[in-house]
Amino acid sequence: MNSAHSIVRATRDYEAWLASQVRVVRPGLQAKHKLMAEDGFSFLRATFYRWAQLFPALFPKLARAPKVLGVGDLHVENYGTWRDAEGRLVWGINDFDEACPLPYTNDLVRLATSAWLAIEADDLAVGRGAACRVISEGYAAGLEDGGRAVVLSEHNRWLRDAVTSRLRDPTQFWRKLAARPVVRDVPTEVRSLLEAALPETRLELRMVYRQPGLGSLGRPRFTALAEWRGGKVAREAKALVPSAWLWAASTAGNRQIYYDECVRRAVRAHDPFLQTQGAWILRRLSAYCSRIELRQIPRWSDEQRLLWTMGLELANVHLGTRGASARIRADLRSHKLKWLRQSAEAMAEATVADWKEWKRKTV
């Protein structure tokens, strides 16, 4: 793909390709287009396909860095919580829709760029340079440590207090989910998958549509709500397609979906309810098993510490690639001291330029 093409053309080309992979939800794409115009941070989250064009073009040396099975579409709001097989509350990277083999530098620069843009949007109260520094330090610590799941049960109380605050109230969570519009046209395959994922068969289901993120807007997504033994339960099915990184690299013939492999390899305490079935990802939803938005974290939180831990968790994922630690640490030693800040600044500028063009030509 040609990075010199405008953001409007890039969006048109990507969405045409997306329509060849899955039955797109047009109202979802329309909502995405509107949200892309709001601010640079929202635009970044919605347009990994554009990032996948720009990053290798702007940073050919970084694009040749050691490859890992990486996240792809990483940003500061792609983190959440879940319960592991032991019932412990765990925090970490939430979404692997765009996972595929790519240079480890992509995920680091994208995370730092997202922090840069979140700071501009007043969603984070930390200096840009400090944000890049602590992300890098947390990542290096994770590599050195060999991987450590971020378990919140008896450790990391500061983070547990932040992510279980009143801003993630369970009553409000279920009220909002119940208010989502009902979906009538649910594919038989998806209904069967959701029914099988619930704790009992033959529960009375209410199928709804929700829009929790930006990057996946336009893809089919179904949520099943049910009452079970005194309370509500929910399961979600979301359609998966090959990573936009493969599309941008003109390797769209590679139709492999790496979501499950990336999750299984990562050095983490896994969510036993997260599973892929064909081209669908199934997961349990609850107040504390979901993605976390920055506005849901109290402003008294230690945001530098939060970003440090985001870097550490990224290392947990990259360590799933055998031999990655030694190669990455050797490559990091070859970079100048402020390489991450300089790269994030350049990508933030390119992203904001695209965002302004998008607003000018579409709003």
Image: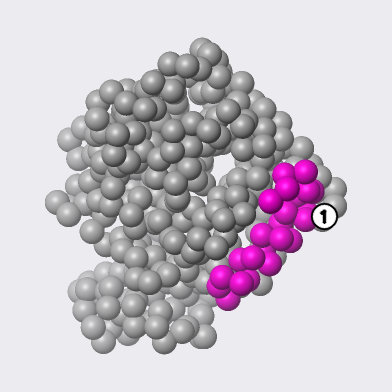
Instruction: Label the magenta part by its dominant secondary structure.
Output: helix
Q: Nearer the viewer, residue 266 or 45?
A: 266
> Is residue 71 shown above or below 182?
above
- Residue at horizontal 60%, vertical 50%? 249
Quickly name the residue at label 1. Answer: 363
In percent of width and height, residue 69 lies at 40, 45
In this rendering, position of residue 1 left or right of residue 337: right
In percent of width and height, residue 158 lies at 31, 30
Q: Secondary structure at mark 1?
A: loop
In percent of width and height, residue 269 lies at 23, 46
- Residue at horizontal 62%, vertical 30%? 59
As drawn, the residue found furthest toward the left would be 86
Mark 1: amino acid: Val
Q: Quadrant of the C terminus?
A: bottom right
Q: Quadrant of residue 301?
A: top left
Q: Nearer the viewer, residue 98 or 154?
A: 98
- Residue at horizontal 21%, vertical 79%? 200
- Residue at horizontal 51%, vertical 12%? 337
> Does the magenta portion include 5?
yes
**Residue extent of the magenta highlight:** 1-23
